[in-house]
Image (cartoon, helix red, strand yellow):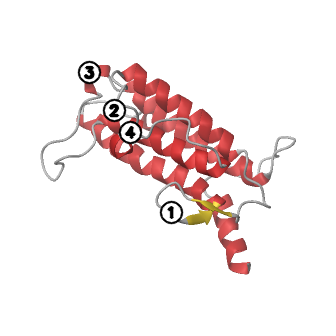
Amino acid sequence: MKRASGWLLVAASFGTAMWAAEPAGRSAMSSSFDRQLSGVEREVVSLAEALPADKFGFAPTQGEFQGVRTFGQQASHIAATLYMIASAMQGEKNPSEAGKDENGPASLKTKQDVLNYLKAAFAYAHKAMNTLTDQNATEMIGAPFGNNKAPRVSLAVMAISHTFDHYGQMVVYARMNGVVPPASRR
């Protein structure tokens, strides 16, 4: 348990400004992860909003980019995965359709469709982050990928790290299209 406690401390302190006063009724654990999710949400959503609609279908073609997701698919993949992780954290059935290759529902056709799906996924993931407590963080729960179990807190870490991974790819796509990410303009 000592090893798990140390890991939890590292996971809970992941990022910045973690030790502000907690809102009434929320644990330090849930507040920490919820703030981290808010940070990545701000970056991803502002970038998706900044890219012109006609560039949502862009994917690099030069070099080793054969078969990669388009910008829009990167955003909808983030959303689909957030839904999968958040539903597992809450022990609920996924309220969304993961779609082919976890790229979200096939009905997502426009920039606005993707943005709506992305924003709804973040809202659902915030709900999941707010279920974390010191008592349930190490509880082994069904993981959304495969038939394995994982500590609830590791899914919270996955929601944030996976999102930042795809955000990095989206930044490259945006810059290739002459769009400076809003986070770089501050």
Residue holding disc 3: 54
Left or right: 150 as drawn, with respect to 46: right
- Image side of residue 128 versus residue 160, left or right: right
- Amino acid type of disc 3? Asp
Q: Earlier in the sequence, mark 3 or mark 2?
A: 3
Q: Is residue 79 visible in the rendered structure shown here?
A: yes
Q: Amino acid at mark 1?
A: Asn
Which residue is at the far bottom?
2
Residue 74 numbered tag: none
**What is the CA distance from the residue labelled 1 to the residue labelled 3?**
39 Å
Res. 49 visible in picture: no
SS state under label 3:
helix
CA distance separating discs 1 and 2: 29 Å
User: 122 or 9: which is nearer to us?
Assistant: 122
Instruction: Kindly identify which residue carries mark 2.
Output: 72
- Helix, strand or loop for disc 1: loop
